[in-house]
Image (cartoon, rainbow, N blue to C red):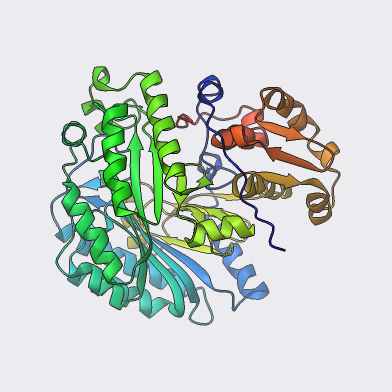
């Protein structure tokens, strides 16, 4: 008999409003603000060499960061470089080629790749010729498995003719489209004019070319947005029936993100309106048959993300939720974060620093973190909460050889308050996120974050809603 791992979900506006606060998204644990400078290159090389010794044939995941955007969206909080000069991407590819050669030199044999993702910035800033060159560089360093999952973030406004077909010929089979909102007044206020017909035509092109699991990104909380505009956006988007929808909260942090200074605070929806928009979006998506995957993500029941959730095999990594087994990730390009075994390593965030390291024939790494056993235990607990909404205590104790009640005594004490509020249930057998708690799963995960509890953080996180 098939037992579904999909937990029910219930939208409780009052509970969400009460627990609204900032928190990490846990695309990694420990979170990237814990990485430190100093030993990034030796830590990374040690991790690669022990991988060679222990699992030489294991397939890799690759991530390539393509940072250029030719206009800036005012809500942007990404690490990107604004330019209209396509020639800058040629220079960038020169450096990516050097970086790949340095990484490749550390392997005895050409490594196999089961997953590749192009993120940005705007990956579709590149011209067709630049994409051809990038694929040639990657294929020189790595062997792509025939069934590899190749995905790209697409900006429908910046799509050179024939690019989706070109990428499909190279094996690309997944894409995510940036949309955010379809209302023209909202689009103008955030400097992202993107007619709905354009988005629809790119989505249809993608489908015709065989791209699967097509995702659309939406944002709530943008200037001039209201329940009314959100409703209109959802009606149109649901008419297109994308396989996946990511629904992000806009966090206004103009002191951290320069482009956000162009957004007029007076035009932002009030917190109550923002919450009403979230409620509308969630109920509309659930009524339309989408499954809530967790942490901002929805998918149609037949989509592989929903299937993985159902089967209890869902994963979480730097790109959010994933169906792929937790393979080592080599990340290339400015600011990109790799994870090999128990080591995280991040490239320089500033382009000039990234170029300078490669000019000196050095891996362009700036920061790293070697996970302790405690980090690994907590990473597993947070993973279970975010991917399955439950920690099964006897299984966890057996896997990690510990007494849950003793090991997590302080965490469990901190969790009691959330239990009283109805976010979790706690027993000897399991910690389970309730249907009402699912939209606040990261609040529960934060109770298992040792670094947060020890309050050593200086990082500012986005709010939950
Ligand atoms: S939101 Fe995306 S497309 Fe817009 S400026 Fe930021 S990185 Fe570029």
Residue drawn at the location 45% of the way across and 42% of the way down:
287
Query: Residue 428: horizontal and vertical position, in percent?
Result: 85, 39
Total label count? 0
Residue 292 can be seen in this image: yes
Residue 157 can be seen in this image: no
Query: Residue 386: horizontal and vertical position, in percent?
Result: 60, 45
Depth order, front residue of 168/423: 423
Q: Which corner quadrant of the figure contains ligand 1?
A: top left
Q: Look at the image and tell me in which quarter the N terminus lies.
A: bottom right
Residue drawn at the location 59% of the way across and 62% of the way down:
326
Residue drawn at the location 28% of the way across and 29% of the way down:
228
Judge left or right: residue 162 versus residue 444. left
Judge left or right: residue 393 versus residue 215. right
Depth order, front residue of 263/465: 465
Q: Look at the image and tell me in which quarter the C terminus lies.
A: top left
Judge left or right: residue 229 versus residue 286. left
Q: Is residue 425 above or below residue 272?
A: below
Judge left or right: residue 54 versus residue 219. right
Residue drawn at the location 36% of the way across and 22% of the way down:
273
| Residue 412 image-quadrant placement | top right
Q: Is residue 326 above or below residue 286?
A: below
Query: Residue 219: horizontal and vertical position, in percent?
Result: 34, 38
Depth order, front residue of 453/201: 201
Query: Residue 150: horizontal and vertical position, in percent?
Result: 39, 68
Q: Is residue 236 above or below residue 357?
A: above
| Residue 192 image-quadrant placement | top left
């Amino acid at each position: 008999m098939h037992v579904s791992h999909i937990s029910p979900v219930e939208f409780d506006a009052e509970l969400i409003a009460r627990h609204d606060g900032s928190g990490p998204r846990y695309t990694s644990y420990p979170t990237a603000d814990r990485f430190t400078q100093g030993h990034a290159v030796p830590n990374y090389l040690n991790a690669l060499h022990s991988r060679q010794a222990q699992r030489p044939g294991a397939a890799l995941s690759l991530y390539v960061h393509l940072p250029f955007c030719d206009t800036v969206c005012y809500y942007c909080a990404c690490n990107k470089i604004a330019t209209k000069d396509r020639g800058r991407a040629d220079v960038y590819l020169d450096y990516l080629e050097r970086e790949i050669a340095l990484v490749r030199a550390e392997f005895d044999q050409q490594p196999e790749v089961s997953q590749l993702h192009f993120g940005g910035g705007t990956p579709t800033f590149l011209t067709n010729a630049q994409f051809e060159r990038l694929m040639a560089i990657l294929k020189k360093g790595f062997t792509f498995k025939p069934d590899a999952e190749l995905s790209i973030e697409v900006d429908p406004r910046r799509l050179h003719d024939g690019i989706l077909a070109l990428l499909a010929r190279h094996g690309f089979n997944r894409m995510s489209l940036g949309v955010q909102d379809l209302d023209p007044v909202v689009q103008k206020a955030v400097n992202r004019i993107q007619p709905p017909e354009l988005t629809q035509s790119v989505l249809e092109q993608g489908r015709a070319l065989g791209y699967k699991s097509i995702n659309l990104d939406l944002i709530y909380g943008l200037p001039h947005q209201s329940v009314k505009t959100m409703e209109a956006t959802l009606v149109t988007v649901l008419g297109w029936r994308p396989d996946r929808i990511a629904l992000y909260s806009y966090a206004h942090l103009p002191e951290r993100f320069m482009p956000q200074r162009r957004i007029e605070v007076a035009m932002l929806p009030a917190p109550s309106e923002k919450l009403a928009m979230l409620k509308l979006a969630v109920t509309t998506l659930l009524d339309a048959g989408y499954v809530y995957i967790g942490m901002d993500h929805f998918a149609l029941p037949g989509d592989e993300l929903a299937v993985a959730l159902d089967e209890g095999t869902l994963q979480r990594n730097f790109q959010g939720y994933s169906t792929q087994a937790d393979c080592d990730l080599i990340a290339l390009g400015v600011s990109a974060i790799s994870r090999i075994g128990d080591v995280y390593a991040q490239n320089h965030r500033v382009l000039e620093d990234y170029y300078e390291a490669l000019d000196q024939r050095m891996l362009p790494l700036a920061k790293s973190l070697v996970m302790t056993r405690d980090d690994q235990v907590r990473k597993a607990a947070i993973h279970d909460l975010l991917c399955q909404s439950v920690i099964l205590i006897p299984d966890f104790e057996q896997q990690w050889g510990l007494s849950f009640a003793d090991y997590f005594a302080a965490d469990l004490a901190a969790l009691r308050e959330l239990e009283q509020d109805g976010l979790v249930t706690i027993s000897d057998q399991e910690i389970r996120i309730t249907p009402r708690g699912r939209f606040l799963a990261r609040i529960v995960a934060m109770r298992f974050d040792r670094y947060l509890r020890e309050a050593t953080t200086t990082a500012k996180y986005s709010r939950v809603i």
